[in-house]
Image (tube, rainbow, N blue to C red):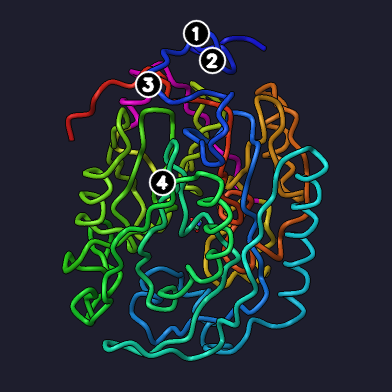
Amino acid sequence: MQPQHGFSCFREKSATILGGDGGGTTNPIHSFDEWSPLKAVVVGRAGGACVPSPDDPMVRACVSERNLELLRRYKEQPFPSTLVDAANGELDNLASLLVRWGIQVFRPESVDFTRTFTTPHFSSKGLYAAMPRDSLITLGAELLQAPMAWRARFFEYLAYEKIKKTLVKSGGVWRTAPKPCMSDKLYDWHFQPSGPGHFATTEFKPCFDAADMIRCGQDVFVQRSQVTNLAGIAWIGSTLPKGMRMHRLVFDDPNPMHLDSTIMPLRPGLLLVNPQRRCHQAQFFLDAGWRMVEAPLPALPDDWPLYLSSAWLSMNLLVIDQRRVLVEAGEHATLRLLESLGFEPIPLPFRHVYSMGGGFHCATCDLHRSGGLESYGFSSMNS
Ligand code: DAV
């Protein structure tokens, strides 16, 4: 494969090793990037999922008018069982494939998210454990559990307690960010979508979803979104593992929620970008020698039901190693693009998981990849 802008396709030899214990580690938690060979991963489960209420301003802030119709129809009910069964079939199929490839797969516990819970500040039903990437992120040798911002996700962590126990028993470091009480002060109750820079979360307490971060070795990218506030970003920055640094990115996106359908690093020096969400810091990537390739338009038919996300899940990919990338089977243009970039894209049906709000990246959380704390050419950003 040809080097891109000065990077070989996988910089095992040429990268600057800044620390970390590399591929030979026995720590069960070890992942610094989105592309180096995957060794262990969490794959979500769709069972027990509950449709969130569009009466919650946070939910309204994060989803499009089109999605809201479905939320109004099914609010606080289980997701339709035919959808859940089909999504579970796709997730199980993904998990079996990964196991066949020799990757260790962990699955969350089944939790009934349709039960109402009450805290001193609010009552809500849950959501699901279908998208581990939203709540968990491996930052080097530590797993960080995000506080989340939707009330419906307050108790989502319960589905991951057994995985946590297993990993911690075998020496893994699992950190949990302080959970905000999610009182009314965390939200702008009069929020109306009015363009970039307006958010439904206030700065009352730090909150963030893990999926608002993308990892490139020593450099971690983060965005202020509907679910990640500036206090949350400051908290992440102040607790980043040694040798890592954070850069805040801004996009032309009136409704930002999670970075992984906006940018997706495919290998060192190659960033897949959403052509409808211009990155204000594109020059930062170009200066670092990265090539930015626009993702093709999604192939999803207009009438395909999407409860929580846009069709840009087409670029929500899971890179397995320097060659293989998982792509939704109907995304022909994305499959072709990846081939032209020297990958072996693996088509896999995933549209029912799409319906529930995520693609391959969202529905997984890598626990172990062989790459280390490396520099991929970024300088420090002045923003
Ligand atoms: O529609 O771009 C995708 C959510 C991925 N966790 C979107 C949001």
Classify mark 4: helix, strand or loop: loop
Quarter assignment of residue 305: bottom right
Number of the front mark, 3 or 2: 2
Locate residue 367, reporting x and y percent: 56, 44
Are there few (<14), some (14-19), or many (20+) residues within 10 Å of tag 2?
A: some
Q: Return the disc, 4 or 3, that comes first in the chain's sequence.
A: 4
379 vs 62, nearest the viewer: 379
Q: Are marks 3 and 2 in contact (CB under 8 Å)?
A: no
Q: In the image, what residue type sits under mark 1?
A: Ser
Residue marked by disc 2: 11
324 vs 41, nearest the viewer: 41
Residue marked by disc 3: 286
Q: Quadrant of the N terminus?
A: top right
Left-right relation of 251 to 347: left
Residue marked by disc 4: 277
Per the rendering, the mark at residue 324 is: none
Are there few (<14), some (14-19), or many (20+) residues within 10 Å of tag 1?
A: few
Q: Are marks 1 and 2 in contact (CB under 8 Å)?
A: yes
Q: Return the disc, 4 or 1, that comes first in the chain's sequence.
A: 1
Residue 287 is covered by the magenta coloring: yes
299 vs 27, nearest the viewer: 27
Q: Return the disc, 3 or 2, that comes first in the chain's sequence.
A: 2
Answer yes or no: disc 2 within 8 Å of ligand 1.
no
Locate residue 312, reporting x and y percent: 56, 52
